[in-house]
Amino acid sequence: MGKLQERYSQYTLPQQIKAEGIYPYFRAIESEQSTVVTMNGREVLMFGSNSYLGLANHPRIKEAAKKAIDKYGTSCSGSRFLNGTLDIHLELEEKLAKLVGKESAICYSTGFQVNLGVVSALCNRGDYLLLDSLDHASIIEGSRLSFSKILKFNHNDMSSLEAKLKLCEPDRIKLIVVDGIFSMEGDITNLPVIVQLAEKYDASIMVDDAHSLGVIGDGGRGTASHFNLTPKVDLIMGTFSKSFASLGGFIAGDESVINYLRHNSRSLIFSASMTPASVASVSTAIDIMLEEPERIKHLWDLTRYAHEAFKSHGIFIGKSETPIIPLYVRDNFKVLQLTRMLLDEGIFINPVITPAVPKEDSMIRFSLMATHTFDQLDIAIDKIVGSFKKLGLLSASTVKNS
């Protein structure tokens, strides 16, 4: 056995969890992404999806994808930089820039690659990246590839951010990078104060709107729109695998910055471009979002209802303000137990344990779609509350309920 195999043969944690019968990952779904999915031949209510607008199985989007395949084939067989740019890529980028109120935009093949390629490319030696401590992993990975100085501030703590800004040399680029809606906690970044601090310390702002587009802002336009601060935000990033029912991502901003990224962002230049079907799907999803505002309204009706219901049953949901609702358990093993119990009860949710979060913040991540019904939500809440009770978690979940 080689040294590589010897080292990783000792990694047996997944096998141990499987032996307990509570392994919660790579669970196979045998149907389309909807509010009800099929697993092992039986129907399960889906409350673990990021399809916030419920568009992943929309007939118009499926038809648009089929037409794109008929015209362009299944792959572009190259990067955007060389042979992989289609006319529909350019049309989508123009639509996205207009959607989020920026001069220009460019699409990457995944949302992860957007953050990887943008964050790593924009700041040089002596510059500064200022990151929220709970920023998405893709932002963290991008920062690790940057030659800039990385300063992390406490989650959504504006005094902590200002303290970090005071450490920066005034004549260097300072880029503040934050999630718009934080993907696990479900709270919204304090953009108004970030803007004030950015102006005070001559910093720039990038907002990751992966979980914000289709959820907050005018017509689902995201965090900057939500706070009416679009001109004050330098860069807006978004993904297509959530509200927009596809795969890929984009960055939007001033033409000068996008032009630089277009010619220097390695995860763009050295990756294959978005497939034709993905591009057509995104474009159609945006049209549906803008044509059917009742989707977002219903999503928020469900969200308010769920927040109050969980709180009334004594389940702590932290500072969530959105359809992403953390149900705090604070015990890794019990999170895995709950996940298994709820799946057996016909409810699909996502476990969040160490190292994704500290052990004391382990949780169930419960997420809503605009296509859920109140009856489905009531069933899920009832099953979840019952499972919390069986494991004696209700009192534990309220420890930080202040």
Image: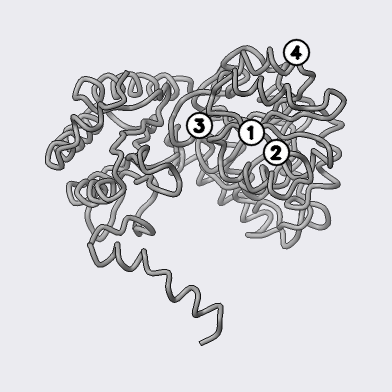
Q: Amino acid at mark 4?
A: Lys
- Residue hosting label 1: 131
Residues tagged 1 and 2 counted as in contact (Cβ below 8 A): yes
Which dot marks residue 182? 3
Distance from Cα at disc 4 to Cα at disc 2 = 20 Å
- Residue hosting label 2: 150
Question: Residue 376, located in which quarter of the rendered image?
Answer: top left
Residue 145 place in picture, x, y as percent: 72, 50
Q: Amino acid at mark 1?
A: Leu
Task: Pick whichever of labels 1 and 2 is earlier in the sequence.
Answer: 1
Residue drawn at 63 percent across, 23 percent down: 161
Image quadrant holding the C terminus, namely top left
Residue 178 place in picture, x, y as percent: 61, 30
- Residue hosting label 4: 200
Which dot marks residue 194? none
- Where 351 falls versus 319 (above or below)? below
> Crowdedness of circle 3 by 10 Å Cα count: few (<14), some, many (20+)?
many
Residue drawn at 79 percent across, 53 percent down: 269
Distance from Cα at disc 3 to Cα at disc 1 = 13 Å
Foreground label between 2 and 3: 2
